[in-house]
Amino acid sequence: MKAVTASQILIGEKWHSDLSLLVTDGKILSISKTDELPANIELQQLEEGYLAPGFFDIQVNGGGDILLNDLPSPENLLIVEKAHRQFGSTSILPTLITDLPDKMKLMAASIEEVRQKGHVGIRGVHFEGPFINAKRKGVHHAPFIRKAEETFLDLLDEYQLGACLVTLAPEEVPIDFINELIKRNVIVAIGHTEADYETCLTAIDNGVTGFTHLFNAMPAFLSREPGPVGAAFQSQKTFSGVIADGHHIHPATLKSAITLLTPNRAMLVTDAMPPVGGKSNNFRLEDMDISVKNGKCVTKDGTLAGAAISMEDTVNYVTDELGFSLSSALLMASRTPATFMNLSDQIGSFKAGADADCVLLNSAGKIQKVYRGTDF
């Protein structure tokens, strides 16, 4: 056992300068006042900075020059995880966008394998599709979009996936299908949808708790047609992912949305593509050439295709560009997604029993070092 402290530690929503984490076997045993530590406890004083829980990115399509839809093998999953860890994401949900059943099965098998081998940074999986609305497909491959299917439920029963998130369009699946997902402890989010406000509320009443990249790939929020965005704002039991890169959402819109949702319901996500943590600014998605131009991933016709940002980038954007406090940004990058995915007892906050995964930042929100709990 050892004690770990820094000049400032984020406990809950507040910074503390007089506390230490007591860590053993990668877990937080307790939180104690530094000047009350027993004399026999080794104290590790981290360099000057702000110590916060590691980030949890629930939408990671790729990184390190790997696109998971190309080949979601165990080896590629670990490359993607490593690429994001340097930017503070000590936990991720590798994401497979709309694809064929065999590719989804390979993703499930690979997720199970790496988790069984102890790679805890991969907390589970995000299936973004294929049960979406073709009218809001974005860069998802249209021929792969499907209706609800029993084989997907069989896949969920066959593999041990950890935390599982499914993004779907509620107007494209029967309520019974959503109910079957919920029975399997799947977290369901609305996305790539044409659903109206009432349809979204019905889905929420049946257990849906999230919205995937709010504002994007869904109808606009209008005065007489609130749509999915209005449902996200109104339902206090739902969470919304937002891509804070200055391209997917206008900064004024995003600032208003986060203010309304609060950092307890808004989640920072990257929607990251292969260039994040990689060397190349170009990649292919099915039959499309995609490149990074002016900080955004676009097809040849200028359509947004995921993002070229890290979680560190999102934290910096909402503090530097939108004016939110560092503590609020960090909550949206850690505790809130952990709560959404029912993992708040394990990650996202410094508390007894949680993993001691940490990021050390300077006063400007730039990462100085990333720690796994087992590093201490």
Image: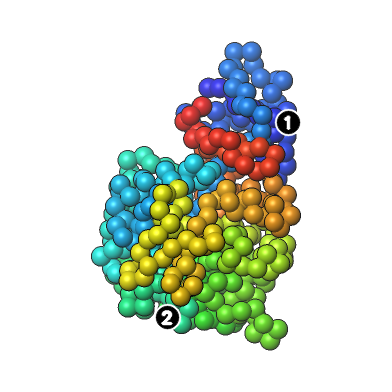
Percent across and percent down for residue 267 are 59, 57
Q: Which residue is mark 1?
A: 17
Q: Taking the image as drawn, is residue 132 in sight?
A: yes
Percent across and percent down for residue 86 are 49, 41
Q: Which residue is mark 2?
A: 134
Q: Which picture quadrant has residue 165?
A: bottom left
Q: Earlier in the sequence, mark 1 or mark 2?
A: 1
Q: Of 170 and 78, which appears nearest the observer?
A: 78
Provide the secondary structure element on which disc 2 rests: helix
Q: Amino acid at mark 2?
A: Ala
| Number of numbered discs visible in the structure rendering | 2
| Circle nearer the viewer, 1 or 2 | 2
Q: Is residue 362 above or below residue 276?
A: above
Q: Amino acid at mark 1?
A: Ser
Q: CA distance from mark 1 to mark 2?
A: 51 Å
Q: Of 316 and 13, which appears nearest the observer?
A: 316
Query: Which residue is pictured at 41% across the width and 49% down the height?
Result: 279
Q: Is residue 66 above or below residue 139?
A: above
Query: Which residue is pictured at 54% across the width and 66% down the height?
Result: 213
